[in-house]
Amino acid sequence: MTMFLRQRWIDTRLKYNPIPGVTSLELDTKAMADVWIPDLFIVNEKKANFHDVTTPNKLMHIYSNGKIFYSLR
């Protein structure tokens, strides 16, 4: 079974001036390593592992107000 984990939060340290015609900035996986991500855990977890592929299955968008959308497979 494949599961997608999607999180949203606001980090005011990442606010930036809006750019005309751009709704959000999409980070590559190297840049994502420099962004704080909440440490999520599932209390009743019985088994978990990450889907390992040649390219990480991660997506991160940062909006001008500091809102972050993060998706992980």
Image: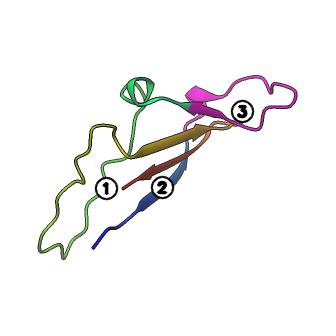
Mark positioned earlier in the residue sequence (2 or 3): 2
Q: For mark 1, does the 10 Å Cα neighbourhood hold few (<14), some (14 to 19), or many (20 or more) residues?
A: few
Amino acid type shown at disc 3:
Ser
Identify the residue under disc 1. Answer: 40
Residue found 69% across the figure and 36% down from its top = 24
Up the image or down, 45 lies above or below 40; here it is below
Relative to 50, 18 lies left or right: right
Mark positioned earlier in the residue sequence (2 or 1): 2
Indicate which disc residue 7 carries: 2
Q: How many marks?
A: 3
Real-space Cα separation, disc 1 to disc 3, in angstroms: 24 Å
For mark 3, give the secondary structure. Answer: loop
In x, y percent, where is residue 17? Answer: 77, 23
Amino acid type shown at disc 1:
Leu
In x, y percent, where is residue 10? Answer: 57, 44
Amino acid type shown at disc 2:
Gln
Identify the image quadrant of residue 26.
top right
Most foreground residue, 58 or 63: 58
Real-space Cα separation, disc 2 to disc 3, in angstroms: 17 Å
Residue found 44% across the figure and 24% down from its top = 31
Relative to 31, 14 lies left or right: right
Q: Tell me the quadrant of the picture where the C terminus can be found.
A: bottom left
Relative to 73, 65 lies left or right: right
Q: Main secondary structure of the magenta part?
A: loop
Q: Are marks 1 and 3 in contact (CB under 8 Å)?
A: no
For mark 1, give the secondary structure. Answer: loop
Q: For mark 3, does the 10 Å Cα neighbourhood hold few (<14), some (14 to 19), or many (20 or more) residues?
A: some
Q: For mark 2, does the 10 Å Cα neighbourhood hold few (<14), some (14 to 19), or many (20 or more) residues?
A: some
Identify the image quadrant of residue 64.
top right
Indicate which disc residue 64 carries: 3
The stretch of residues the image draws in magenta is 11-26
Q: Are marks 2 and 1 in contact (CB under 8 Å)?
A: yes
